Image: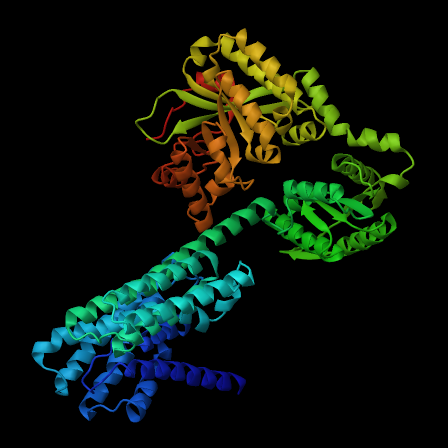
Amino acid sequence: MADAKGTLRRFLLLTGLYYAGAVLASLYLRTPDDITLFWPSSGIALAVVVSWGKRWAVVVPFAVIALHLTVLPVPLAFVPYSILSNTLAAVAAGWYCERAKRADGLHLRTADGLMLLRSGLILAATSATIGTAGLLHAGMTTPVDAGRVWLLWALGDILGITTFAPAFALLLGPGGLREGLWRDRVGRREQVVWAIALLLSLAGIVTAGRSGNLYALGLVSMPLALLLWAAVRFSPMTTMVGTILVVTFISLLTGLGLGGFTRPLTLLDASVLMLLLVLISVIPVMLAVATYEQRHTATALYLRATRDPLTGLLNRSTFEERARERLTGETPDPDLSLLYLDLDHFKLVNDSASHVAGDDMIRTVGRMVGAEFGEEALVARTGGDEFAVLVPVSESQAITCGRRLLASIDGLRISWGDQMLTAAASIGIAHSHAPHGDFDSLLSHADAACFAAKEYGGNRLVAASREGDELKLRTASMRSALQVREALDQRRFSLFCQPIIPLDPASSTKRSIEILLRWTDAQGQVRAPAELIAAAERYRLGPRLDRYVVEAVLQWLETHPEHASSIHHCGINLGGGTLVDEEFHDYFAARLRHSSVPPERLCLEITETSVVRDRTRAQRFIQRMRDLGCRLALDDFGTGFCSFGYLQHLDVDYLKIDGSFVRDLGKSELADAVVRSITEIAHVLDKRTVAEQAETIAQLDSLRAMGVDFAQGYAIARPMPIATFFEDLVPAKVG
């Protein structure tokens, strides 16, 4: 019963809207055989079938019959044609929309706008053809005038579609208003000024028309300019509603000959007027859509740069940045507690079930952590199975919350296939009173406490201030850093490399490579150094590790000059700590002076996040390395929400597009847009782009089509020992 009532209400609403648009159009008719210059109902009909499907074109015949029975009598012979022209046109447009509309529905984007326009042209052509035939059959026009009638009818429909369809399609569609289309991003004062200016501009047109000025219609540029202002500054719906008001107002003045204006008397006059109004209705809406898309993309990029994609929580870099701000703010909280949570034996979940199951557990735990601490807390996923929370509570309150969270995680049960997955966690807590110390120290204490909780068997909480054996905690927290020192002292690191190939077949045949580091553990297994590198960065061993890599690379190239001469450039990764290490520049400059390797053969790769963290020092480092003759690359570009605006001040040669975007090519519109945008802007700034982690030939083809200059990844070659790489025949490029 409720569904039937809802359907009836919708039917009456849509029929009433169509009828109201037709009544407005009837004002333009002086005689029954006139052709209206403006048919708003066509836009409403298109919005109805786009939003609810072509079956809802059933509202059209009821509204048309009501129109002819009340305000617009016509010869009886024309009535069937009037009904069919409007109804079948709406059905045809709806049929096209159902095939052209994307699976995710109608949204405010350029592609959907063009789809609406194509549907509108189908509607206008269909309606004009049937309507003209009806006028001829009813004797309301002559064959000689059939072409004029068809053109005016079609233009009237098109004007109604371009004016009313965008706004009503979003208003009538299910969930259309949830996209924040009404939410203006500017202050109330600017909105009031704009509204007053719009009213004054319309009044100015009327005043000029009454004065007999021959160029009064030229003043439509004023409301058009104000609509463009709205498109750039205000919400999309504000622009659309303003466009409807302006077009309707101007069409009434000119179409009815009001305000001193003369009603168009010839086909040319009417066509020019209607085309002008179509442009006024289209241009602001197109600009509003483009602006909205740009904002939407920027927001998506911002979220991707600041949020963990799996849990929606803050990512590590954003958490650290905001935590530092809270600790050093002008009015800091009197109590701040940092909780560091690490899931126990999480690797067993990935190994026994799958990584998909592990991701499901991470998402669930992330929701539990966020729900426990509320909106005042900073909650982040800082690693694969690690979470951090900075909350303005006392240590005792933090301990209570932490224990409650541990109990919730311990009681978690996730059914996965024939398994029942369980979870446990360890939590370390560090507390700070105002005035607060530095964040790194607080994090170190919380991390140390968490490590101690794991050593005690896990599924427990340790507060740094309540742990008796402080020396034991500090020793435990430095264990991973000691592994780095041990590996460096025993030179248990080895050089691997991966080719970087040009995507343009006409490019140089010289090889480009990126140096990758591997280390050998105590059991003699060669392992990726991700954990050790992270520990080195955390405990400020990064510059020492980077010196080791630079020295090893230069020694190998000096020992193998025949291979060094075949290299276009050799990429060496540098950590964020090296960028702020003043001694590294002196060491590197002295080392290059005694090397036979030309500096231009070396390409130093620095991450975008390290540049964002301290832009001034990063720019100084880049300039110093540039003065030495080295090339530079901005690595992992796109993950740190790097502003394109300051790229022009970063003198780098290459932008290395982060692999997360490359892997999503063809599967994510955002990934396609990001890769294309980075490439285009890089070329404008005379920089080259390198796509990381290209894993398939299809991705290489997409990258080549987008104009990306270079690529590296498994689709080309896996990392291999540097000696093996130069012994094997490795293609220099993919044609």
Task: Tell me where residue 101 appears, x and y as whole percent.
Answer: 37, 63
x then y, percent, for residue 144: 7, 77
Residue 587 visible in the picture: yes
Q: Nearer the viewer, residue 578 or 238?
A: 238
Give the image location of residue 494, x and y in percent: 59, 19
Residue 653 % position (x, y)? 45, 27
The residue at 70%/52% (across/down) is: 365
Q: For this view, does 132 lie left or right of residue 630?
A: left
Q: In what quadrant of the picture does the C terminus appear? A: top left
Please give the name of the residue rendered at 75% of the width and 53% of the height, measured from the top-left corner: 409
Residue farthest to the front, as pictured:
211
Q: Residue furthest right?
A: 468
Q: Is residue 256 above or below residue 583?
A: below
Left-right relation of 562 to 219: right
728 sits to left or right of 337:
left
Q: Residue furthest left?
A: 144
Disc tally is 0
Image quadrant in which you'd find residue 103 = bottom left
The residue at 48%/16% (across/down) is 629
510 or 73, which lies in front?
Answer: 73
Is 324 situated left or right of 640 in this image?
right
The structure's colour scheme is rainbow
Residue 713 visible from this viewpoint: no
Quarter of the image for residue 288 reads bottom left
